[in-house]
Image (cartoon, rainbow, N blue to C red):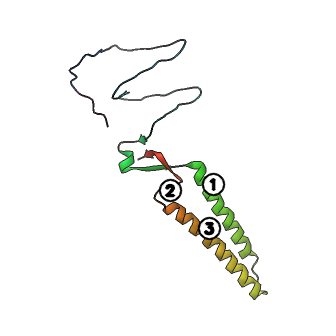
Amino acid sequence: MFKPEFPYKGDQIILSSERVLIHSNKDAIFLFGKQAVSLSSTKTINLDAVDSVLVDTKLVQLGPKARVLGEPVILGRTMVTQISVLLANLVMASSKLISVSSEDLGGSMEKIREAGEIMNKEASRLKTLLDQADTPVLSKVTYTR
């Protein structure tokens, strides 16, 4: 992480006023820094846009040392897909269990076995997926704390 030098010994420009406004009425405003661009406030920093806010980087850390001390955020659509598959299989298995009857013990035992196989297969698949070091439901670039 970049640590700025204080006091700075090179050339610099300092603007100080009760309010500073930079406005471009036709195109854009660009801020570039070879080491860093810092925005700091004792209260609030606002990022407002009508269309979107784009953060294009290899790593997003939400909070200090988020990657080291925090955890990756969940990829929403991927997690919903995995939970949907799990629930569909649980519904299928529970339908077999609901149809079990005491009158037909032999057939009912087969339905119980099939339901158990469905639940076991799906639970094992999801556990294997989630146990992977590179779990596909976790973000590889956004971490929070």
Q: Amino acid at mark 3?
A: Glu
Residue 129 is covered by the magenta coloring: no
Please give the name of the residue rendered at 44% of the width and 14% of the height, measured from the top-left corner: 22
* Magenta-drawn segment: 1-5
Which mark is on residue 81? Answer: 1
Disc with the residue nearer the chain's start (3 vs 2): 3
Label 1: which secondary element: helix
Residue 85 spot, x, y in % from top left = 65, 60
CA gap, disc 3 and disc 2: 17 Å
Q: Is residue 122 above or below residue 18?
A: below
Label 2: which secondary element: loop
- Judging by the rendered image, the residue that carries numbered circle 2 is 135
Label 1 neighbour load within 10 Å: few <14, some 14-19, many 20+: few
- Judging by the rendered image, the residue that carries numbered circle 3 is 122
Q: Amino acid at mark 2?
A: Thr
Label 3: which secondary element: helix
Would you say 24 lies left or right of 35 here?
right
Along the line of sight, the residue nearer the viewer: 142 or 97: 142
Please give the name of the residue rendered at 78% of the width and 86% of the height, measured from the top-left corner: 104
**Residue 40 visible here:** no
**Residue 126 visible here:** yes
The quarter of the picture where residue 99 lies is bottom right
